[in-house]
Amino acid sequence: MEGTVTVPTPGARGTARPAPTHPQPPTTTSHPLQVAIIGGGPGGLYAAALLKRLDPAREITVWERNAPDDTFGFGVVLSDETLGGIEHADPEVYAALQQDFIRWDDIDIVHGDSRHTSGGHGFAALGRKRLLEILHDRCRALGVDLRFHTEAPDPARLAETHDLVIAADGVHSTTRAAYAPVFRPHVATHHCRYIWLATDFAFDAFRFDIAETEHGVMQLHGYPYARAASTVIIEMREEVWRAAGFDGPDPQESIESCAKIFAEAMRGRPLHSNKSAWTTFRTVVNERWSHENIVLLGDAAHTAHFSIGSGTKLAVEDALALAACLQEQPGIPSALSAYEEERKPVVASTQRAARASLEWFEDIARYLGQPPRQFAFNLLTRSRRVTHDNLRLRDARFTESVERAFGCPSGTPPMFTPFRLRGLTLRNRIVVSPMDMYSAVDGLPGDFHLVHLGARALGGAGLVMTEMVCISPEGRITPGCTGLYHGKQAEAWRRITDFVHTRAPGSAIGVQLGHSGRKGSTRLMWEGMDEPLPDGNWPLVAASALPYKPGSQTPRELSRAQLTDLREQFTAAAWRAARAGFDLLELHCAHGYLLSGFLSPLTNRRTDAYGGSLDKRLRFPLEVFDAVRGVWPQERPMTVRISATDWAEGGTGAEDAVEIARAFAAHGADAIDVSTGQVVAEEQPEFGRSYQTPYADRIRNSTGVPVIAVGAISSWDDVNSLLLAGRADLCALARPHLYDPNWTLHAAAEQSYEGPGVVWPDQYRAGSRHPRTGRTDAPKPRLTLGT
């Protein structure tokens, strides 16, 4: 339910005029006496009730253009966390909600002939109409002025006559639109169509039902909200929706078709509509949520996809936070600032989870070939909010069945199951990601590299990767980078591989070969990352004569003859790597270095056979791969690291990455190491927990090629979740291994795992249990008498 406002009069150029300055400044106290609320949905109503309850002297008016019982949804799901906040803030509202809640624990996932149930999830729902009735009653009892069938006045005028204006006018907020230059909204639409419907019976679980039709994949999201009613959302990609003929002006025929498609879920009964229409979801993000004494709340400020059930939840939590900040802060400006500071990180986290869930359902067809139990686990963990560990706590039987289907021996976490690449069997799925140490002299690895790599091998990782090892002096990133361009370097590396093989048996060690391209001849990272050397620079070469950033050296575009020389340098380095005893070789085609520079259209502007289309941009990296594969021992695996996106307009994107991975696999790559970015200086990455893993997921489940996932994976729980869901085959961690060289050993100890997937060195075995922490762990004395 949304309220509307009249948009301020456009100026001469058709842009909304800003709110005029207040002739009389509003109240500066954080306890505003005159409050206007635009929109009578749950968020606006709850804010009204809370503010009136906290200060009965306030005059609060809610404008809602619709009737009191007009609502375009059916059921509302609230989490226990949100309900706890409601109980604390307004016990009367909580008590009324409690009487009407329908509670259940199970989630059913139905696809074809398979049905899997996972329990222990704990949902609570009620009808949206009933929720509004409860909030209406509470507002009236407290003395809030509710004005239905009434358009809200111009927000600029409300701002002049009220101390505070709360815009809770929904996803299509006209308040937000009127002040767009201030709030700076970004509204993104997505690839699916969906429709809100209902049934006249209650599902006995939260149900996900996937149907493969002649037109494509359709999915049903259903949950009970009353003793004899359930919400049903039907969703499908836009192209499926059109192919099915659901794009007609009257949705009733499509609703009847959906009831037949999901007849088993619907028990043969019809689907009911309430002015329902097919629509696309809009993700709303605002840079600012307040302007002077106007503040956005709920869907006006942000949206999160319905598949994680968050819209009403977020709006209610906004209202709680806003009321609290107005109570705690000395003035309205500081209160609104505190409100944004408190809520923005929470909402951003929810939106990241919702985006992951939304995209999973958009691409659900990619996962339909997974084994049924893995598919179910993948669906349950799609947002990364639910993980392997907490799913095991909720439903150990279900999780154990997924583990068995994955191939985990009894009592073995997924991360400690072995994985085979060609003739190499890794005892666990943990990789120490390549990390440049900038500590070599003339390309020679020394004692530092021995200790650094040896320590991580002793720490239990299945595979330890070197930093990028350069194929020539001119191919170094910095003067501190290691190389494999002469025999002494190979001998130095042999010392390290021998240590790993003899002192950390069971751990493998891999070498990453690369050439810096246009990103070479720079300072050590801690002296100025990507900054040119103050002196002693060497000439650079690249796919095209483009500097990495302003102030960087401009490289020479490689000639045909130079391409041949480079290919030979790669093969010579690979031959030395084999003699040095490495178990695996990775070709570095990521992060804007030389081979990556050929792959990206932003860095490859060539007009010959090595530039232009993706096939042509792939040509030289594939030639290098073939040459290296030709000298690398056949029983030893080769992987390729790629940047799956440039994080820049016009650059490599996710679909390009799939084709790049497919091409390398066709030439014999055993796995793709999926990183992102660092190709162009003007990139705009979307950082976050496990933020690069969706690209690995896409490649793995589009091509069937094994992948190494990397990028802000920091917990063993995330690793287990990614592996068990089939989003990755191996997980590479960098910074966690800098923080803790024994990360893998400690992950085993924390999971109480003792088995062949990880072995404590004899010298460290006494430390395989968490040390006692002193008197705080001692038994507590009894200080009270029993009754």
Image (cartoon, rainbow, N blue to C red):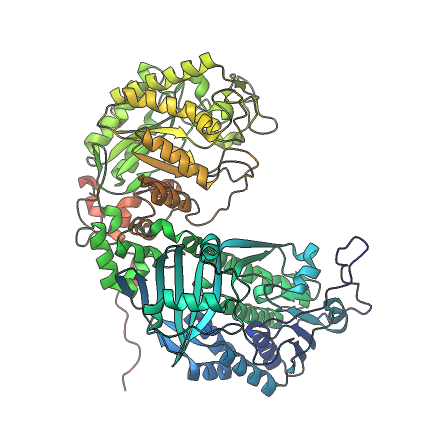
Which of the pair 587/55 is nearer the observer?
Answer: 587
Q: Identify the residue at horizontal 50%, vertical 24% (top origin).
A: 611
Taking the image as shown, residue 488 lies to the left or right of residue 95, namely left
Q: Identify the residue at horizontal 51%, vertical 79% (top origin).
A: 129
**Quadrant showing the C terminus:** bottom left
Query: Vertically, is 603 above or below 35?
Result: above
The quarter holding residue 562 reads: top left
Taking the image as shown, residue 445 lies to the left or right of residue 612, namely left
Residue 773: percent from left, percent from top: 30, 56
Residue 633: percent from left, percent from top: 24, 23
The quarter holding residue 732 reads: top left
Query: Vertically, is 295 above or below 639?
Result: below
Residue 311: percent from left, percent from top: 51, 66
Q: Identify the residue at horizontal 27%, vertical 63% (top origin).
A: 116
Report if residue 464 is visible in the image.
Answer: yes
Taking the image as shown, residue 771 lies to the left or right of residue 598, namely left
Query: Vertically, is 613 above or below 29?
Result: above
Query: Vertically, is 600 above or below 692?
Result: above
Residue 658: percent from left, percent from top: 40, 38
